Image (cartoon, rainbow, N blue to C red):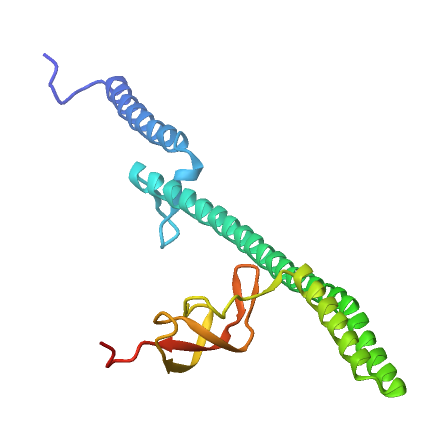
């Protein structure tokens, strides 16, 4: 009968080979699993020896940060472009405002020149009338010439929209008349203009200068 300790050498060798083969397979499996990990999710540990695999959460967080950085860069570019557009529009508006002021100034200057050109003949006639009156020593001729010149001047002013304000005999209007004197009288209705000291004028619908007038006032002790 064979002692159980007397195991054949071949059986022990076979058993040893089997164990070694299993260990080798385990090592090959680990190497295969390590090789299947993508390079972009591996990095060396601070000690430079171990390989650490990032979790999915870390990878998603890194991708979100990259997206946010890209969006911030795009927003910054848009903001710079909008700022440039604003500065350009501001410069255009300043140029437009300056051009409008210059055009208004030129238009006003042209209007003044046109008015003065029509007023100069009136001045010429005044000078001519005075010269003729001095030569002829004729008061009636001077008076007649001044009347004609006054009519000519009024025509020029009327063409510009300037018209005299009616005053004497009219009811006092504080928007058109300036009362410089009041007189107690029963000859005129109360608040009636009885005398004009200085004529007023309208420019279109605007009061250019109010009339300076005397206004009637009813006496207080009238029965």
Q: Position of residue 186 (x, y in %)?
A: 34, 75
45 sits to left or right of 165: left
Closest to the observer, 95 or 64: 95
Count of picture labels: 0
Q: Tell me which residue sits at (42%, 42%) in the image.
A: 67
Closest to the observer, 111 or 209: 209
Q: Quadrant of residue 183?
A: bottom left
- Looking at the image, is 192 positioned above or below residue 75? below
Q: Single out the residue that lies furthest toward the right.
A: 135
Closest to the observer, 61 or 12: 61
Q: Tell me which residue sits at (64%, 58%) in the image.
A: 96
Q: Quadrant of residue 134?
A: bottom right
Closest to the observer, 98 or 40: 98
Q: Position of residue 125 (x, y in %)?
A: 82, 74
26 sits to left or right of 4: right
**Which quadrant holds the C terminus?**
bottom left
- Looking at the image, is 136 positioned above or below residue 119? below
127 sits to left or right of 94: right
Q: Tell me which residue sits at (38%, 74%) in the image.
A: 187
- Looking at the image, is 137 positioned above or below residue 73? below
Q: Position of residue 163 (x, y in %)?
A: 60, 63
**Which quadrant holds the N terminus?**
top left
Q: Quadrant of residue 179?
A: bottom left
Q: Position of residue 47 (x, y in %)?
A: 36, 54
């Amino acid at each position: 009968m064979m002692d159980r300790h007397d195991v054949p050498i071949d059986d022990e060798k076979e058993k040893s080979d089997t164990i070694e083969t299993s260990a080798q397979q385990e090592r090959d499996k680990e190497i295969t699993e390590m090789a299947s990990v993508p390079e972009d999710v591996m990095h060396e540990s601070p000690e430079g020896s171990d390989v650490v695999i990032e979790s999915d959460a870390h990878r998603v967080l890194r991708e979100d940060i990259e997206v946010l950085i890209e969006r911030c860069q795009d927003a910054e570019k848009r903001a710079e472009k909008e700022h440039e557009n604003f500065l350009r529009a501001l410069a255009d508006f300043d140029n437009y405002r300056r051009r409008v002021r210059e055009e208004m100034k030129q238009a006003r200057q042209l209007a003044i020149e046109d008015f003065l050109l029509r007023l100069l003949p009136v001045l010429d006639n005044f000078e001519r009338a005075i010269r003729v009156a001095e030569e002829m020593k004729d008061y009636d001729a001077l008076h007649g010439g001044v009347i004609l010149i006054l009519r000519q001047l009024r025509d020029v002013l009327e063409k510009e929209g300037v018209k005299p304000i009616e005053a004497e005999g009219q009811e006092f209007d504080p928007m058109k008349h300036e009362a410089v004197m009041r007189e107690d009288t029963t000859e005129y209705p109360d608040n009636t203009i009885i005398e004009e000291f200085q004529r007023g004028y309208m420019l279109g619908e605007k009061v250019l200068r109010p009339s300076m007038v005397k206004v009637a006032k009813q006496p207080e002790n009238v029965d």
